[in-house]
Amino acid sequence: MFPYLYSTLVILCLSFSTVVSQAEDDNDAWSHYESGEMGQYPQVTYKSTRVTTPQVHVIKWNSSCDIQNHVFISPHAGKTQDNKILMYDTKGDLVWYQQEKGSVHNVQVQQYKGKDYITYWVGDDENQFWEHGAGYYKMLDRTYAMAYTVQAVGIDGDYHEFSITPQDTAVITAYVRTPWNLTDQGRDNGYIWDCVFQEIDIESGSLLFEWRASDHFKFSQMAVNSWSSWTGTFQDPWDWFHLDSVQKDSSGNFLITAQHTNAIHCISVKSGKRLWQLGGGVQNTFTDTSSRGLATTFDNPQMARWETSVNQTNAVLTVLSTTTAIDPHQSQGLRIALNLSRRTATLLTTFMHPSQHLARGGGSLQRLGGNRNYLLSYGRTPVYSEFAPTGELLCNTHFAPVVTHSAAVETYRIYAARWKGFPLSPPIVQREVNAFHVHWNGATELRTWIFEGRIALPGHHLSSYQALGVYKTLGFETEVALNQTQSFRAYRLTAKDARGNTLGVWAVEEDGTVKEVVLLEREWLPDASVMPRLALILVVVGALVIMTRSLLAKKILTALPGRVGMQEEVSRRKVALGIV
């Protein structure tokens, strides 16, 4: 007995030491990552595609985070010139990528007419990086096919905003180079970037509403003197207002953030005039009931969104502020309650990262739809974090080393959603000597690959398919080992979801070429629990068909004329009814 116990203890100790050693190796590798020793932009490479993606480091994980979410980023700047859209799962594994011909910003999932779409801006931002761009907007359906494109009317669309309204219209931003008399600014006549937003009908592309900052604001109302960054010439117009975000609310008015006003404004859909202003110093129209006035002293707001529907009394909004009076050295997310009739503002929650990240040149604050947590991103700081409604940091992820602060890889905004994608394109298979490497780009529901093969038989014949293995997907790419002891000449690949439903079946040649494609979308297949009922329905329907045909046959027989050849007539009519 004692030798047995001794052996067992030895095995357990060795196993524990192996686990500890593996954990130490992993920690050591990530320490090299975070220190920048692996480079400013560590990348992941794949066998089945030449695409490279940022190596994502999930630093902190909590079971309260929404594991069903997918995170959308569009890395760019510095060493990343690929203009890619990337979708990751919460473990940091790539799920979908798409290459674009221009820069990409603001990738997110939005609803239009009750259906989910991936929406984003694509265009040129090289000449005005992190300031604004010239492009248009795309909407992809769940198969990743182009469903709609949206163009700004008469001007180029800017990347700061593309939001779909409760009325199923689109709101976009634009920066328009405009000649202006700048003598009151101590300069000759020059040029400004006039900030514009438009509401557009998605189906027809027609303009429904347009607003220009120069029609409703004066230079003297700006809280930030931004002349140090611009000269006011044609090549370098003065960005005096800087419109960051626009959201149309349930009452039809527009919530906007303008960095150089240091404030959030509500714009009337009827007149275009400002109904109220939150923050911005002396022009603030709200009484701050918070301790130290923290609901109105935010600085350089990057984004504002209504969290609740807007009525005449109470509403809650979220704000991403570059800095606040709480801490001028880091960015914070804020939840603020407004009483619109009494004009009072109260700070409800603050989202502050323990590492004091600064949202330079972008960032976002999103209330998640699944668990009602909050996702923050920090622009040029390659971090996104999930917070509890209480303000507690739950999950924290880096997609490049933060220590360098080199903007080697960054993204303007980051969003998350419970997206379900069913790609029309087949899997990509790469053959190696002893294995296939396979990925199915964007197949969010894929959980298992079933691999089968056919052996070559005499006379150029092939055997029936034989099972070669079942492989769980543990990331973007799956390795399928090949048995070299048997001479397989053809293969079959079947994709299954978590419930065992078939997502697709493909014939694969020896070299990895995917030939036959039979795609079966999950939603087209009956649920497993429905199968017994479906079988019963089919049996009943079949019995009814047989009974009906029998009754018809009897009526025909009784109606037949009494003459020679009656049997031939019976046979003829049976054939006509299909009952023989």
Image (spheres, rainbow, N blue to C red):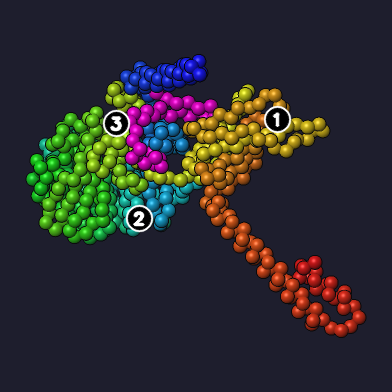
* Residue bearing mark 2: 169
Q: Amino acid at mark 2?
A: Thr
Q: Which mark is residue 46?
A: none
Foreground residue among 509 and 452: 452
Check disc 1: other Cα within 10 Å, few if <14, some if 14-19, many if 20+.
many
Q: Which corner quadrant of the image does residue 61 belong to?
A: top left
Is residue 278 shown above or below 331? below
Foreground residue among 167 and 516: 516
45 drawn magenta:
yes
Q: Which callout, 2 or 1, points at the residue further toward the start of the chain?
A: 2
| 525 with respect to 549 (left or right) | left
* Residue bearing mark 1: 488
User: Which residue shows up at 46% across the image and 28% down it?
Assistant: 52
Magenta segment range?
42-71
Q: Amino acid at mark 1?
A: Phe
The reply to whether residue 30 is visible in this rendering is yes
SS under mark 1: strand
SS under mark 3: loop
Is residue 107 shown above or below 47? below
The reply to whether residue 84 is visible in this rendering is no
